[in-house]
Amino acid sequence: MQRFLSAVLIGIASIALSSSVLAQSSTGSDQLREFVRNSKTAEGDFMQQQLRAPKANEPQDKGLKVVRQTQGHFVFQRPGRFVWDTQKPYEQKLIANGNQLILWDKDLNQATFRPAGQALATTPAAILFGESSLDQHFDLIEGEERLGMKWVALVPKKDPNAKKQNDLPYTKISIGMSNGLPKALELIDGLGSVVLVTLDKIQLNVNLPANRFNFTPPAGAEVLRLN
């Protein structure tokens, strides 16, 4: 019996190791497609940094400068529901419930409601967690390997019938994949500003309560409803 159990454990370990090796040997695009296809829900931690190039009067040898940094916890459920819960240095929640995008600012005691629409599409959380099929909206281009990740560029597809080809405020969108999970999201706008989001402690396909994406402002809060 002991030998049988040992053999079973070795077999399980081998399968797990093989899966990890297979995920890591896959291209970044394949890993990203697999993640989107198989992750119905997930949660984890994030750190979001806003970076800029050094100014003329600043040292030029230290790379991009961090001008703002926040961190917190995220939860998502496809399609298009998530909570982006910033906990430091201030408490703020961005909530998408399928119909509305809600911004709750605890310090201001203010909740802003707006239709999801394009406002949702421009958020880092929606780019990572909103779509059930990235290939419908983006061309996935293999990038370089850096920081231990395989990077994939997301290029918005061109719609010949659309009046505006790209309403996203970013000129470049890249996702860093490692072992089948997205570990970083890099967004660059037309002015050269960079938003870098790193993800950690990701748990896939967790059970979420039905009201996880509901939000009711506390009594006395200022409520703004935008069209």
Image (spheres, grey):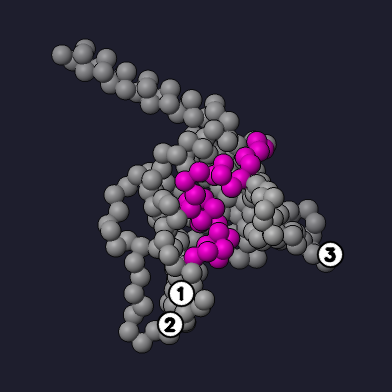
Left or right: 101 with respect to 15? right
Left or right: 59 with respect to 160? right
Instruction: Residue at 53%, 64% (x, y): give it.
Output: 117
The three-letter code of the residue at mark 1 reads Phe
- Please state which of the two labelled residues, at mark 2 or mark 3, is closer to the viewer: 2
List x then y, in percent, for residue 64. Answer: 71, 56
Instruction: Residue at 57%, 63% (x, y): give it.
Output: 118
Foreground residue among 2 and 165? 165
Cα–Cα gap, marks 1 and 3: 40 Å
Cα–Cα gap, marks 2 and 3: 43 Å
Foreground residue among 183 and 174? 174
- What is the magenta range? 116-143
11 inside magenta stretch:
no
Q: Secondary structure at mark 1?
A: strand
List x then y, in percent, for residue 176. Answer: 58, 42
The three-letter code of the residue at mark 2 reads Val
Q: Give the crowd class for mark 2: few <14, some 14-19, many >=20 residues within 10 Å.
A: some
Label disc, if present, on residue 56 of the rendered structure: 3
Q: Secondary structure at mark 2?
A: strand
137 inside magenta stretch:
yes
Foreground residue among 184 and 35? 35
Instruction: Residue at 36%, 87% (x, y): give it.
Output: 220
Label disc, if present, on residue 113 of the rendered structure: 1
Closer to the chain start, of discs 1 and 3, is 3
User: Is residue 193 in view from this perspective?
Assistant: yes
Circles 1 and 2: CB distance less than 8 Å? Answer: yes
Circles 1 and 3: CB distance less than 8 Å? Answer: no
Which residue bears the numbered disc 2?
223
